Image (cartoon, helix red, strand yellow):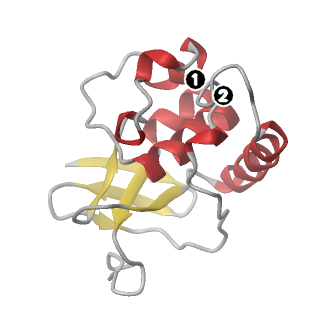
Amino acid sequence: MDSRKSSHGTVSTSRSATVNQVLTRAVILPATALLVPGAAGATDPLAPMRLAVCAALANLAENGPPLVLAHASGPVRGPDVFRPSLAAAGIADHMLPDDVWTPWATRPALPPGGTAASVALLCLGMALGERAADVLALEAVSYTHLTLPTIR
C-alpha cells in the first residue's frame, strides 16, 4: 500500500484503491496528443492551447496534487501512478523531446497510462515539473457509470 499526504487528505492506493480526497475544482482539457510538444513533428499547432492548459493545471495544483480522471478504451484502471506514453496514439516515446519525459526519467518501471491520461500527465509535467511524477490517474471508459472511490 502506498500512502501520500495532500492538503485534501490521505491518498492510498492498492489493488482495491481508496481515495480520501475532496474534488472541488477541475481542469477539463482536450485529450489530443497534439497538446504535447513534438507530437505534430516540427509544427506546433496547439502551442497557445498548451500554454493555457499548463497555466490552468499549475493553478489547480496550488492546493495540492490533482487527480487525473481520463477516458480509457479498456477497463477502469487506477487510481494509480502511471508514466505517460503516446504509443497507443501511434507516437513513439522517442519521437518527443527529451525534456517532456524529465519528471518520469527515474521511473521507467511504472505502467504506461492510456493516451488521454498520458496527455494530461505530460501537460502536468510541463506545469509542475518533478511533482507530476507522483500524480494519481484514474482511467475509465464512461464517467456516467463510474463509481468514484469512497470519500471518508
**Residue 47: x %, y % from top left:** 79, 36
Residue shown at 42%/79% (left/top)?
143
Residue identified by numbered label 1? 100
Near mark 1 (Cα within 10 A), the count class, few <14, some 14-19 or many ≥20, is many
Spot occupied by residue 130 in the image (x, y as percentages of width and height): 55, 27
Say which element carries label 2.
loop
Image mark for residue 37: 2
Amino acid type at circle 2 is: Pro
**For this view, does 151 lie left or right of residue 53?**
left
Q: CB under 8 Å between callouts 2 and 1?
A: yes
Q: Residue 12: which quarter of the image? A: bottom left
Percent position (x, y) of residue 35? 65, 41
The residue located at (32%, 75%) in the rendering is 149
Residue drawn at 37 percent across, 60 percent down = 138
Write the residue at 30% across / 21% down: 108
Q: Position of residue 34 (x, y in %)?
A: 63, 40
Image: 113 above or below 64 = above
**In this picture, residue 47 sits left or right of residue 21:** right
Give the left or right position of residue 53, taking residue 75 as reference: right
Q: Amino acid at mark 1?
A: Val
Is residue 44 shown left or right of residue 106?
right
Q: Determine if residue 85 is in view.
A: no
Q: Secondary structure at mark 1?
A: helix
Reading the chain from its start, which is encountered first: label 2 or label 1?
2
